[in-house]
Structure formats: structure tokens, C-alpha cells
Amino acid sequence: MEEHALPEPRTDHADAYEASDVISNEPARMKTGWIAAFLILAGLIMRAPIVVLPLYIEPMSREMGRDPGSFGILTSLPLLMFVLVSLIVPWLADKLNLTRTLQLGMWLIVVGSLMRLLVTWNTMLVATGLIGAGIAILNIGMPTLVAEVFSEKPGLYTTSYSTGLVFGSVLLVFIDPLITAAFGWRAGIWVMAGMALIPALISMMMPQIRVAGSGADASPQTGSRTENRSGAKLRFLRDIRTWLFVGMFAGQAFLSYTLSAWLPVMLGASHITGVHYTGIMVLFNLAGLPASLIIPMFLARTKRVYHLWFVVWVTLVQAAVVALYPVRPMDALWGPVYWYVFGGVSCFFFTAIFVMVLTFYPLKAATSADAADLSGLSQSLGYLIAAAGPLLYGFVYGGQHMPGVSFAWGMTLVVLLNAWCAWHVVRINKFGLETLR
């Protein structure tokens, strides 16, 4: 087995260490505590700035004197940044090292969050773009960090940040009415900036980590590693296993962003208001928390056959709930019950698939560099496909009317395609650039 020696002082990555060097002695092992803390706290801010922003659109639109409908671009812009930035994150990790890349992502989120306080249209667009770019870096960097530093316990450490993804959004939704009533709507933006600042500062305490198998650790004499990774993305794209990952990621993102954008409108068209409306929306965000807590450890510690059965059962439940949509009750008693079930089951389904694919990046990739390339490609292409979801719904059904039976057929098709890709990803063995034809 190849030994990971400390790099020579005169190289461009003189302060970068392999993960094995980081944890090879007791003082260095203590630094992994900073990495674990970063995983947990950064996870809290990886979804909240996008999901919670609609809470502030009305006061922002009043202060800027703009139509609230024009703020829809603030939901689409992060998806565009995910597509553009995801492809270059492995390159950044190679050139800067993994730690500096994650630091860059965190400080982009901090700066973007603070810029939102300026409340002008141009700064709002720039701020949202910066936040989207920062989150895109973390989306790719986190699975790579787990694969590089915590390869022995990928399930546990994937749980640490995937749970934060859900909990951070739910936390801000719960506390927003309290802090807004006490300090005004800007207080929520300050809280988000503070939530981003803490892991950004913690990232400065992390050891410099180099991605194994990247150009950074190429032999100075031969450069063999760099040559082996040239054209890596193209070689991954030629492999069907990569496209199964793309389909698995794209399906859940398509459902997640479409329902997040249009479920409030669907509830309004169904005359769901007041406490039921609030309860359904809270459940829609909260139902994914059990999936985030349980699934990474479940995947890491159980046999493949159980993973396949899980995909089957969660798909059957989701498909059954969608199949009831055309015959759902319309009365004041049972009508809201259906939407509670629909919101909860849908959130659990797409969160479960999302957490599964995040966990599979380090589990299925041969090296952390392979995990970075696989994650970057599947997320970039997946978000590109998912961005069509909200637009397609609006084009077909409009913003005011309740969708008909075709909605149930369309959602069922997406669920089944997503489950088909997930089924085959579960069956994939560990692979990487060296095993690709």
C-alpha cells in the first residue's frame, strides 16, 4: 500500500496533508474534532438560506417597491449556480486543496448573507448568487471530506451534516415569527449570517487536507497521478453508472424543488388555510429529519438486500399516496388529512433518496477524488434537470388552478424513474477512474 508522506516544503501544497497524515498522531487527531464540528454546523446553513428566503419576500418587496412575483428569480438563481459551480469544485480542490475550497464556500455564504441586509435589487441578486455558489461548493465538498477523513465511518459523518440540512431550515421556520415580532424581519437575515459565520471561523482551524488521487499529490518526477485524472469527467460521463447517479439525484431534486415552489399554491387552491396550512408546511419540511438521522447509518451498516427493500417500500408508499390524489376527499374534515399525508410522505421520500445518494458518493467511489468527480457531475446535471420542474408545473397548470389527474400521472412517473435509478445505484459496486474502460 502506498505511504502518504508529508509533502516537501517547496511544493505548491506545502501546507496540505493527506487525510491519513491528519489523523496519524494524537495532536493531529484532535484536529478532526474541528472537522466534525464543521460538518455539523455547516450542514445547518446548506439549505436554509434558500428555503427560508420566501418568508422575507413580502417585507423585502415593500421596502424595494417591487412586485413580489419578480422575486421568483431568487429561487431559480441558486439552482443555476449549483449547475455552473458544481463542475469546477473538484478542480478547486485540486488547485487549492480541500480545506481551502470549503473555506471559500463558507465565506461566500457569509458575504452573501450580509449583502442581503442592504436590501437593493442588484445586491440581492449578487448575494443570492454568492450564496448559491457557496452552497454548491459545500454540496460537492462535504461528501469528499467524509470520504477523505472519515472513510471508516461514512454513515455516521454523513448523518452529521445531512441532518443539519433539514434541521437548519426547520429551526429558522420555527424561530422566525418570534424574532421578527421582537426585532423585525432583518433579524432573521442576521441569524442566517451568524449561522454561516460560526462554521466559517471553525473552518479556519481545520488542518489543510489534500484530496488523495488528485493532481495535488502527483509525483513531482512523473506527474503520473495528474495524467491519470486528465479527462476524468469525460470518462465518468461515458459510464452508465454515472448516469444512474445523475438520475437518482435529479429525480429527488425535481420533486423537492417543484413541490417546495408550488405546494403552497396547491393548498390555497384546495382551500387549506390557517392552522392546517401552517401544520402541513411544517410537516413538509420536518418529515425528512428521520430520514437524515437514520439512513446514512442504515446504509453503512446493513447488507445491500435491505437497501433494495427500503427503496421498494418507500416507493410503494409514495406511489400509493399520489395515486389517491384524483380521489382525495374534499370536505373540511378529511381534506386536510390527505394533504398532511401527502406533504409528509413526499418530503420523506425525496429526502430519503437525497440522503442515500449523498451517502453513496463515499461508499461507491474508489477514492475521494473519484467521489468529488462523481458528486460534481451528478449534482450539476441533476440540478439542471430539476430546474425544469417548477417551470414545467407553472407552464402546464398555471399559478392559480388545481392540477388535474395528469399531475398524479406525472409525479408517479418521476417517482418510479427515481426509484429505478436508486435501485440500480444500490447494486453498483465500488468504482472509480482506474476501473473505467
Image (spheres, grey):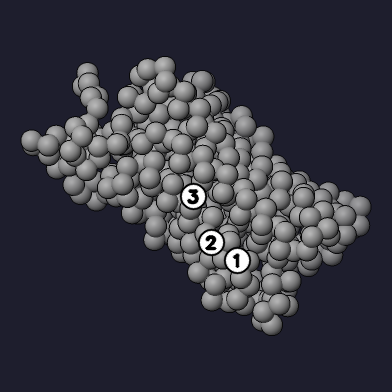
Q: Residue at x 71, y 63 (%)?
A: 186
Mark 3: which secondary structure?
helix
Does label 1 or label 3 sit earlier along the sequence? 3
- Residue marked by disc 2: 112
Count neighbours of disc 2 (C-alpha within 10 A) and say few if under 14, some if 14 to 19, many if 20 or more.
many
In percent of width and height, residue 12 lies at 22, 43
> Residue 116: which disc?
1
Mark 1: which secondary structure?
helix
In percent of width and height, residue 404 lies at 69, 65
Kind of residue sitting beneath label 3:
Met
Count neighbours of disc 3 (C-alpha within 10 A) and say few if under 14, some if 14 to 19, many if 20 or more.
many
Instruction: Give the CA separation, mark 2 to mark 1.
Output: 6 Å
Asked if residue 208 lies left or right of residue 336, the reply is left
Mark 2 in CB contact with mark 1 (< 8 angstroms)? yes
Instruction: Give the CA separation, mark 3 to mark 2.
Output: 10 Å
Mark 1 in CB contact with mark 3 (< 8 angstroms)? no
Kind of residue sitting beneath label 1:
Arg
Mark 2: which secondary structure?
helix
In percent of width and height, residue 159 lies at 56, 32
Mark 3 in CB contact with mark 2 (< 8 angstroms)? no
- Residue marked by disc 3: 106
Q: Residue at x 40, y 23 (%)?
A: 28
Instruction: Give the CA separation, mark 1 to mark 3.
Output: 16 Å
Q: Residue at x 71, y 57 (%)?
A: 188
Q: Residue at x 44, y 35 (%)?
A: 206
